[in-house]
């Protein structure tokens, strides 16, 4: 399965984070606003109930100017004076029958919801006047029932105030549907802008890939243009420096191969030429040719050993430095050199010091001795 490109993955992460932020923020705001809407509904019910109770306790019948005589009259006047919101309604019931309802223009009709009326009947006799949640097949309500009984009443009447929760949440739901639509548009815009921005940010990577593809065994001189000083710009500079080192290494390797080829071909040519011209019946010529061939082969052997040493020099354990007495090391090298030939060997000087170095490697090559016949 083909992996997604870095650009696509970065875009998907960006879109995911945007969606996650919008969902979390929207959900939190919706839940808080829903709780606030419930609180507003309850406050409205509590305020209306308080005003109705105050009307019954302190007011008089506006027609007679006398105290209230029946619950029907008090509830009728209370309904007339109560300004209901679109999602609010009320109903009065006595002995299982609906006694009064609000005007016909009120959208929420409690009297048309049998399950709600059953709940009202279940409140008789009422034990606690508190706001409750009532769920029916028609809707969900926040409702409170107030028992009312005046001097001329044979039984009490239940005056019920209710708020249609689902109707009250309609505006809130509509608002957050709009929020969802705007959020989807924002995600789409974020995706388009993110695709362009990520593509622009990854432009140095694209140029790096193209340059890497254009580099061949015969052409490693291509470099990437640096257009910024950010992290990707620094990466481009680093890659260019790596290409410089690579070109230097390849060039040195080619030069080394050319030099080695030349050095190896020279003794081979000499040996081949003498072998082709040697007179097999002349013992002196055979001996001379043999000596020359052995000398050239020895030179080739030394060259091969140098190449092996050069190859090993790149290894981590090529050098093994240790504390070495330079004075003692110089004397040892002098003693070994004195055995190489019948000459007058002389040691010019020595250093009295202990330094970290590899005694074996330092005595392999590079020692210069002056001899006097």
Image (tube, grey):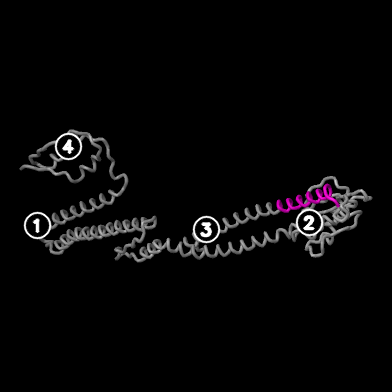
Sequence order check, earlier mark of 4 and 1: 1
Numbered tag placed on residue 284 in the rendering: 1
What residue is drawn where x is 35% and y is 64%?
211
The answer to whether mark 2 and mark 3 are in CB contact below 8 A is no
- 2 vs 3, front mark: 2
Question: Within 10 Å of the Cα at label 2, are there few (<14), some (14-19), or many (20+) other Cα atoms?
Answer: few
Q: Which residue is mark 3?
A: 13
How far apart are labels 3 and 1 at the CA level? Answer: 87 Å
Using the image as rendered, state which of residue 369 and residue 352 is in the foreground.
352
Q: Position of residue 28 (x, y in %)?
A: 62, 53
Q: From the image, tell me which residue sits under label 4.
A: 330
Task: Say which residue label 2 marks.
Answer: 82
* Residue 313: % across, % down: 27, 48
Q: Are marks 2 and 1 in contact (CB under 8 Å)?
A: no
Residue 41 among those drawn in magenta: yes
Picture disc at residue 17:
none
Quarter of the image where the C terminus is located: top left
- The residue positioned 78% from the left and 49% from the top of the image is 50
């Amino acid at each position: 399965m083909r992996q997604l490109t870095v650009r696509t993955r970065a875009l998907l992460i960006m879109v995911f984070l945007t969606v996650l932020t919008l969902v979390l923020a929207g959900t939190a705001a919706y839940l808080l606003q829903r709780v606030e809407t419930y609180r507003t509904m309850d406050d409205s019910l509590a305020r209306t109930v308080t005003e109705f109770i105050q009307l019954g306790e302190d007011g008089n019948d506006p027609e007679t100017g006398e105290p209230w005589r029946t619950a029907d009259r008090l509830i009728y006047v209370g309904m007339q004076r109560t300004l209901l919101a679109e999602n609010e309604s009320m109903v009065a019931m006595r002995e299982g029958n609906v006694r009064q309802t609000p005007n016909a223009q009120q959208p929420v009709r409690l009297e048309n919801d049998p399950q709600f009326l059953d709940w009202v009947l279940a409140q008789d006799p009422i034990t606690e006047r508190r706001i409750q949640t009532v769920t029916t097949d028609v809707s969900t309500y926040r409702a409170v029932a107030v028992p009312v009984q005046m001097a001329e009443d044979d039984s009490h009447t239940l005056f019920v105030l209710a708020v249609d929760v689902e109707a009250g949440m309609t505006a809130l739901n509509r608002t957050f549907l709009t929020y969802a639509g705007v959020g989807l548009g924002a995600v789409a815009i974020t995706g388009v802008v993110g695709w362009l921005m990520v593509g622009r940010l990854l432009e140095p990577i694209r140029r790096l890939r193209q340059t890497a593809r254009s580099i061949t065994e015969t052409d490693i001189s291509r470099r990437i243009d640096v257009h910024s000083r950010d992290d990707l710009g620094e990466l481009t500079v680093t890659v260019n420096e790596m290409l410089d080192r690579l070109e230097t290494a390849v060039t040195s390797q080619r030069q080394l191969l050319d030099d080695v080829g030349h050095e190896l071909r020279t003794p081979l040519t000499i040996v081949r030429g003498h072998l082709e011209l040697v007179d097999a019946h002349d013992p002196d010529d055979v001996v001379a040719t043999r000596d020359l061939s052995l000398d050239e082969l020895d030179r080739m052997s030394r060259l091969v050993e140098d190449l092996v040493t050069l190859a090993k020099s790149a290894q981590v354990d090529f050098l093994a430095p240790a504390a070495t007495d330079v004075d003692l090391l110089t004397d040892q090298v002098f003693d070994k050199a004195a055995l190489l030939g019948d000459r007058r060997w002389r040691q010019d000087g020595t250093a009295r010091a202990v330094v970290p170095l590899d005694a074996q490697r330092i005595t392999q090559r590079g020692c210069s001795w002056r001899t006097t016949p």
